[in-house]
Amino acid sequence: MINRLVVIIILAAGVSLVMGYAYTTFAYFPKLAHDRDLSQSLVGLTIGLNSLPFMIFSIASPFLMKKFGRKTYLAVSQLSLTVGVFIFATLDFVKNKQIFLTLSVLSRLIVGAGMSSYTTAAYSYTTILYKDNIQKGIGRIQAGIGIGPIVCLLASTFIFKWFGFFVTFAVISACMLIVTLIIVIFVPDIKDEAEQEQEETPKSMTYKSWHIFRDLRIIGCIIGAGLAMLLIDAPSALVADRFEELKLPEYLKGLTFLFSNVPFTFTSLVLHRFTKISHRKIIICFGWIFLAIGFLLIGPSGLFHFPERVWLILFGFSFFGISYASLIVTNIPLMQEYASQYEIKDDNMSETKKEQQEFDYKTTTGYISGAFNLSFGLGTMLGPLISPRISAGIGYRGFTDLFSGISILSLLIFITFNLLHLCQNPKQLRNQRDPLEKAMNTSENISKPEEDISNRESLLKSYDTS
């Protein structure tokens, strides 16, 4: 079987192009739309509209992957992205306002469906391939989210300046087609293995796969991911106009987004190392803090009378990148950890039957990926929709101050929720992971073969005593 790192690189390449397209859209579409007499509200609606099919396919993707297989689903998703982005590129030739709006909506709907399907399948692949260290696998996929915009924005700065809107997005579409072919040739299909395990496992054994959503901690993670994306994506419909006010040249607008993606990529790659020292929940707390600081800087804040300087706004975007990684990369592994700890609470079920219920890993990862993408999509849709209206009412700087306050409020709610849960479950005050899992994730335990038996016996003893 092909090396899992190669599979992750291929999956990350697809995610990179998706996010590269998204950020390139933020940089260059608003100006083109305004030239076709579209209002700022319509621009925000068009940008956020892809989240509607994103949410729908987030729910449907786990079931569709089971039916058609992850590889087929992955390839078709990437192909739909290719078609959607190419339609988007042709907008450069459309002068009629109604036709322009219709094609914009059509392309965004196709891209939204493909984006949701692809990312759900990619996360599902990752959590299975990196079962021994989910944070590391997710971090590598999320690094693709950072690398894609960096490469696309750097390249688009010159392509857009020399060749214009059509060629910029046609090149992205062509790269997506190449990734589709690579997926078909090199990525293995793990559907048969999953189906075989499901057939050999009694139906009662999959009880926890969907009952995990009774756990309020998992629901909290889902809501938190959606809220984080709403806040992070809210300025996307406004920032291009903000740079227009500050007289930034058109071809340089794309480069400004690098200030969020470079720290995001670095943070995503190293974040799995910090979880061995600090709990994931602490990282999430810092994520909300960085997001609040970022909003104060990208205004810059009118409440604190910060000067209106481009470098200050760019510095604020770097905080956005760190907060994005801290809030999103940590989310799926945290939900997976909660799912593995879930205890069945059913008074009508005997203790013997409860003990028979096991954690159906492959099925649960699909549900978690789908729930995460559903919340993610809702946030990315609502953010660009509401931000123009808020900005029109209280001004851009007032909008950023308000969202900074919401970030701090989210932090306080997160801390309060976790403190209340710990008070109700004092055993979790230790915040210790399964010692057997911890040992599996530690490179020192991949030792000499003759030491395996003694190591396992000591690990099992420590597990029993804990």
Image (cartoon, grey):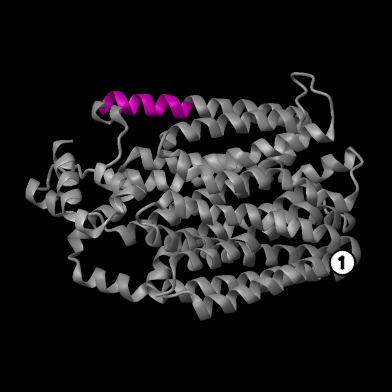
Q: Using residue 392 as the reference point, say whether residue 250 is left or right of it.
A: right
Residue 70 vertical placement versus 283 (above, below): below
Name the residue nearer the viewer: 192 or 54.
192
Residue 46 seen: no
Tell me if 170 is positioned left or right of 441 in this view.
Answer: right
**Residue that carries the numbered disc 1 in the rendered image:** 96
Q: Is residue 416 magenta?
A: yes
Relative vertical location of residue 111 with respect to residue 315 in this rendering, above or below: below
**Secondary element type, mark 1:** loop
Question: Which residue is located at x 67 percent, y 32 percent?
Answer: 294
Q: Where residue 79 sits: x, y (%)?
A: 60, 75
Report crowding for label 1: few under 14, some 14 to 19, many 20 or more residues within 10 A (C-alpha): few
- The residue lying toward the viewer, choosing from 211 and 73, is 73
Residue 382 in the image: state x and y as whole percent: 62, 45
> Given the image, on which type of amino acid does mark 1 rest?
Asn
Q: Is residue 454 left or right of residue 194?
A: left
